[in-house]
Image: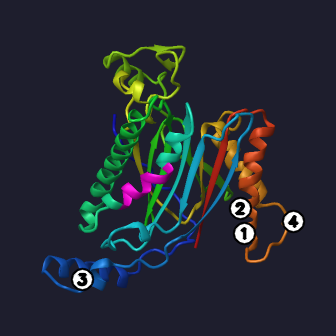
Amino acid sequence: MDLFDDLPEPTQTSGRLSAPSASDEEEERTAKRRREDGGEDVEVKRVCKEGLPELKAYVAARRGEREEMQDAHVLLPDLMGFLPSQPELVSRLSYFAVFDGHGGARASRFAAEHLHHNLAKKFPPTGDAEHLDKLIRKCLLDTFRQTDEDFLKKASSQKPSWKDGSTATCVLVVDDVLYVANLGDSRAVMCRTEAAADGQQKLLALALSKEHNPTIYEERMRIQRAGGTVRDGRVLGVLEVSRSIGDGQYKRCGVISTPDLRRCQLTANDRFILLACDGLFKVFSADEALRFVLNVLQEAGVEQKAGLTEEELRFEAACQQLASEAVKRGCADNVTVILVSIGC
């Protein structure tokens, strides 16, 4: 199984974001030559990129019919402040994540509190552009492993030991590139548009994550090779996901904390990213969820609030209404929805 899937580039662009000019390309070539020659020009080495898309995040959470809210989330449009030092070649670092707990809320809360700190500690401070991608991927794998190990250590030290587990779907934005790392059945979807043959805009629901449950062949085979069993679509007939943070009692049965990683270049056609726990997708398909958001964004009237633009108000309304609609449609589970708008 390839953990490092790159997502496809669009076939059309609308021109919202400008392409690099000849002078920009020459500047980067000059910077590369200076690095190769041992030059000390720090400003050139960092290659501060202009015109990065603006990201704004919105969240809505509903307890549903559950006695406890076991979801957790993190919105960090600026992760730079958590890093020990300013990394070279990176101008913007953002992080958004949703965690869906099971067996309790302790694993999801632990992951929400600690995973981005581990990521900041492990993020590569140096490295040329050619190798930065591999270093970031390794950083994400190490971050998930470390977070899982830390939680399991804490859980096993309790009396009685904690049995909690959690999914994790995290989006790391490095300048204008998305890195998505996920475990379990929470999901991330991008709303991308492309020009159709008739001149109309075609909506694409671009999956950014991969679901992990024991009914998937590769996941089931790994569990069985580890000595576990899958009954009624669950590990040992109990656990619905095949990868998670926590769930110490199932780790010996092939449940792992290794995320799938995907990389996606942001384009001029990208409108927003949707991250949500499985509570939303029990009652919405990905296409339905994106169209629901777009319909709210296109509604005529919006209540004005001081300090917020009309677009911000529309995204906030879309996020809240999507979570509420999931409950109205009969989802009894916790529902957490994150929308990340992508603008010039």
**Which secondary structure type mostly characterizes the magenta part of the structure?**
helix
Which mark is first along the chain, 1 or 4?
4
The residue identified by callout 1 is 311
Can the viewer see residue 208 in this picture?
Answer: no
Q: Are marks 1 and 2 in contact (CB under 8 Å)?
A: yes
Which of the image's four quarters has the N terminus? Answer: top left
Which mark is first along the chain, 4 or 2?
4
Dot 2, crowdedness within 10 Å: few (<14), some or many (≥20)? many
Give coordinates of residue 222: x percent, y percent.
35, 23
Assign a secondary structure to mark 2: helix
Give coordinates of residue 236: x percent, y percent.
46, 16
The residue identified by callout 4 is 301
Assign a secondary structure to mark 4: loop
Which of discs 3 and 2 lies nearer the camera? The answer is: 2
Q: Amino acid at mark 3?
A: Thr
Quadrant position of residue 294: bottom right
Residues drawn in magenta: 112-120
The residue identified by callout 2 is 315
Give coordinates of residue 166: x percent, y percent.
50, 38
Q: CA distance from mark 1 to mark 3?
A: 39 Å
